[in-house]
Image (cartoon, rainbow, N blue to C red):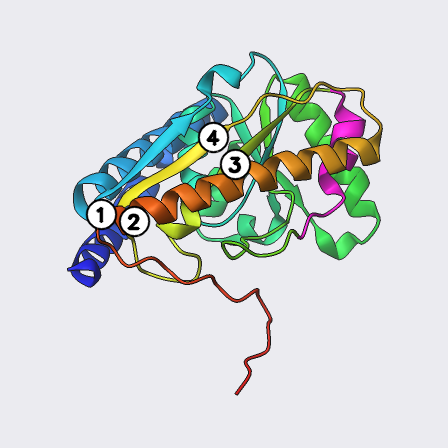
Amino acid sequence: MLALRSLAFNICFYVLTTVLAVLGLPTLVSGRAVLRLARLWGRITLWLLRVVAGTRVEFRGLENIPDGPLLVAAKHQSALETLALCTALPNFTYILKRELLLIPLIGWYLSRSGMVAIDRSKGTRAMSLMNAAAGEAIRQGRQLIIFPEGTRRPVGAAPGYKQGLSHLYTALQVPCLPVALNTGLFWPRNSLVRRPGTAIIAFLPTIPPGLPRQEFQALAQERLETASNILVEEGRQGLAAEGHPVPAPEAPAGAATRR
């Protein structure tokens, strides 16, 4: 049953994404229209996930989202939070790698909606270019989303935080909103399985601007890791209580296999 529901959802998801990408082409005339399309895509996907796969997404701490420009630091376990955050933050923009702009159709939408793309081929100059683009997004009142570990991490993996988050925090001088989650239990990375249950995305209290860079980095990591570990344990207990198999901890990316 799990395999069939997962397959059905994945077919619906990719059909939905393709249809919206084609029919939504007229929205490319406006960045705001593209953001509205992205929120529609996110909401329909979450509905399909609940109805077809039996996976609900619960947002906690919505009252912690302040008005105005914001740096959003989200734990990254799954593709699920990428689309779910579109529905909770009205004026979002992501920091992403430039290669994503080259994807047919999808890259057009990313470019038009003002995503902050990092060109890693430019070496040290990439940081200054990111600063300029991020600063412009903040001046527009955007909510700038960054995944501090740079990529999706296995559930329960040791922290792998980069310096980009603290660099932006110092440069932008806006509040930072940490986002903890347990989505990797339900929409695992590198897998087509979609487990039934309740995935939780929690907006934690903001960290005000002005802290020393290293103090902020340590505080943000501690808050994200502590809250996410609690949510992962809650998710595992929920899966067990419902009689669903509890996924074993994933091996960290690149870990050697012992025989």
> Badge 4 is on which residue?
202
- Disc 4 is placed on an element classified as strand
Tell me how many marks there are.
Answer: 4
Disc 1 to disc 2, C-alpha distance: 5 Å
Q: Are marks 3 and 4 in contact (CB under 8 Å)?
A: yes
**For discs 3 and 2, the disc positioned in front in the rendered view:** 2
**Residue 121 in the figure: left or right of residue 63:** right
What is the magenta segment's predominant secondary structure?
A: helix
Q: Are marks 1 and 2 in contact (CB under 8 Å)?
A: yes
Label 4 vs 2, first from the N-terminus: 4
Disc 3 to disc 2, C-alpha distance: 19 Å
Label 3 vs 4, first from the N-terminus: 3
> Badge 1 is on which residue?
242
Q: Are marks 1 and 4 in contact (CB under 8 Å)?
A: no
**For discs 1 and 4, the disc positioned in front in the rendered view:** 1
Disc 1 to disc 3, C-alpha distance: 23 Å
Tell me where residue 27 sits by quadrant.
top left
- Disc 1 is placed on an element classified as loop
Using the image, tell me which numbered label, if any, was put on residue 161: none
Disc 4 to disc 2, C-alpha distance: 19 Å
Q: Amino acid at mark 4?
A: Ala
- Disc 3 is placed on an element classified as strand
> From the image, which quarter does the N terminus lie in?
bottom left
> Badge 3 is on which residue?
180
Kindly tell me whether residue 110 is visible in this rendering. Answer: no
Q: Amino acid at mark 1?
A: Glu
> Badge 2 is on which residue?
239
Q: Amino acid at mark 3?
A: Ala
